[in-house]
């Protein structure tokens, strides 16, 4: 199983060009992302960071093939993405395991869909569960697991079909801080072992720096790419690196980029709703300008 995945390492290049996506709503189109271009090189770990509602999930869902761009194109290894595929594994923030299936049956599900025979399925699932320390829980049902374990199973399930690209949408957002750090370590270990391309969405600056080779920072909605930042920290990464001056320098840079966009994103809401309600005159300026 692991050699099958390792053979795919020369591939997994994601390219998103001239991308825009609007949602059709009863009140007309909602422009979620406008003019975004990103790429992930084979085997690279790339994060997308940006304020809430800026279009991160929209962009990721288009790479997964769940959404069709209004403009532009998404390709994986030069093939246009036309819909979901087992070659792009997806991990969501909310645990999306089947509650009526055991841990191993959950992991085997994608392989079963691909008509992989029972003993190969079982072997592949047990290998991946072993790497992530979950083998002892293979016959448990998801409701018996902690949040961190459920999300580990979610990652293992997404990896079981040997995808070229792993897509993760704020996968650790619901976990407590300590579990989150451990999950980050497990994910980087898995990624280094499998040499797979990763596109990771988060709004957590430390998480983006700790995990990534490169980070894209998005503007407030309608989202576009505001900046692209290389993370030259050596690997393997250790938690202690988060205190290094190099890490803190990167953090400072990203924080000021995100703060600017978060204020823009908040400005509309605050001036339109709260500030008017409070009878505060902004003299025609936006909330971001005033603060
Ligand atoms: N199905 C939908 N219909 C209409 N608007 C949507 C839909 N999904 C998301 N949006 C809007 O698109 C914008 C981007 O959403 P999303 O991609 O989920 O942002 P993020 O993941 O960065 O928080 C938001 O303003 C959101 O309200
Ligand atoms: Mg989102």
Image: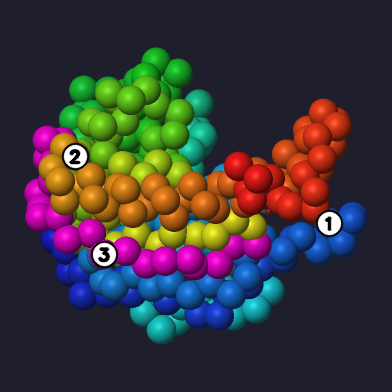
Range shown magenta: 222-241
- Mark 2 neighbour density, 10 Å: few (under 14) some (14–19) many (20 or more): some
Q: Secondary structure at mark 2?
A: helix
Identify the residue under disc 2: 242
Q: Is residue 167 visible?
A: no
Q: Nearer the viewer, mark 1 or mark 3?
A: 3
Name the residue rendered at 21%, 23% in the picture: 136
The image's colouring method is: rainbow
Q: Is residue 236 magenta?
A: yes
- Mark 1 neighbour density, 10 Å: few (under 14) some (14–19) many (20 or more): few
Earlier along the polypeptide chain: callout 1 or callout 3?
1
In this view, the residue farthest toward the right is 26
Q: Is residue 132 magenta?
A: no
Name the residue rendered at 55%, 53% in the picture: 261
Image coordinates of residue 56 in percent, x first then y, are 53, 55
- Mark 3 neighbour density, 10 Å: few (under 14) some (14–19) many (20 or more): few
Earlier along the polypeptide chain: callout 1 or callout 2?
1
Image coordinates of residue 200 in percent, x first then y, are 38, 53
Q: Is residue 6 above or below residue 125?
A: below
Q: Secondary structure at mark 1?
A: strand
21 to the left or right of 282: left
Identify the residue under disc 1: 25
Earlier along the polypeptide chain: callout 3 or callout 2?
3
Name the residue rendered at 44%, 59% in the picture: 217
Please identify the quadrant where the C terminus is shown. top right
276 to the left or right of 128: right
Among the 4 quarters of the image, the one containing residue 157: top left
Q: Which label belongs to residue 110?
A: none
Identify the residue under disc 3: 230
Q: Nearer the viewer, mark 1 or mark 2?
A: 2
Between 60 and 287, the one nearer to me in the picture: 287
Q: Is residue 170 visible?
A: yes
């Amino acid at each position: 199983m692991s050699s099958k995945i390792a053979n795919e390492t020369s591939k997994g290049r994601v390219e998103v060009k001239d991308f825009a996506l609007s949602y059709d709503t009863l009140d007309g189109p909602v422009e979620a992302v406008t003019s975004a271009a990103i790429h992930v090189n084979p085997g690279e770990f790339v994060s997308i960071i940006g304020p809430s509602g800026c279009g991160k999930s929209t962009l990721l869902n288009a790479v997964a093939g769940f959404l069709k761009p209004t403009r532009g194109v998404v390709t994986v290894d030069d093939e246009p993405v036309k819909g979901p595929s087992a070659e792009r594994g997806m991990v969501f923030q909310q645990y999306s395991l089947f509650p009526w299936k055991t841990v191993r049956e959950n992991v085997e599900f994608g392989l079963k869909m691909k008509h992989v025979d029972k003993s190969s399925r079982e072997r592949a699932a047990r290998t991946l569960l072993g790497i992530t320390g979950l083998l002892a829980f293979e016959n448990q049902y998801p409701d018996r697991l902690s949040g961190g374990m459920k999300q580990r199973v979610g990652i293992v399930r997404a990896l079981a079909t040997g995808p070229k690209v792993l897509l993760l949408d704020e996968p650790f957002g619901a976990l407590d801080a300590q579990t989150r750090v451990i999950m980050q370590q497990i994910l980087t270990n898995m990624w280094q072992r499998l040499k797979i391309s990763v596109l990771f969405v988060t709004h957590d600056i430390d998480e983006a720096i700790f995990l990534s080779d490169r980070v894209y920072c998005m503007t407030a909605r309608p989202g576009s790419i505001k900046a692209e930042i290389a993370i030259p920290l050596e690997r393997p990464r250790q938690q202690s690196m988060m205190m290094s001056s190099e890490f803190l320098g990167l953090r400072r840079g990203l924080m000021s980029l995100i703060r600017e966009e978060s204020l823009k994103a908040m400005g509309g809401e605050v001036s339109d709703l709260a500030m008017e309600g409070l009878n505060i005159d902004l003299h025609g300026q936006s909330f971001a300008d005033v603060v």
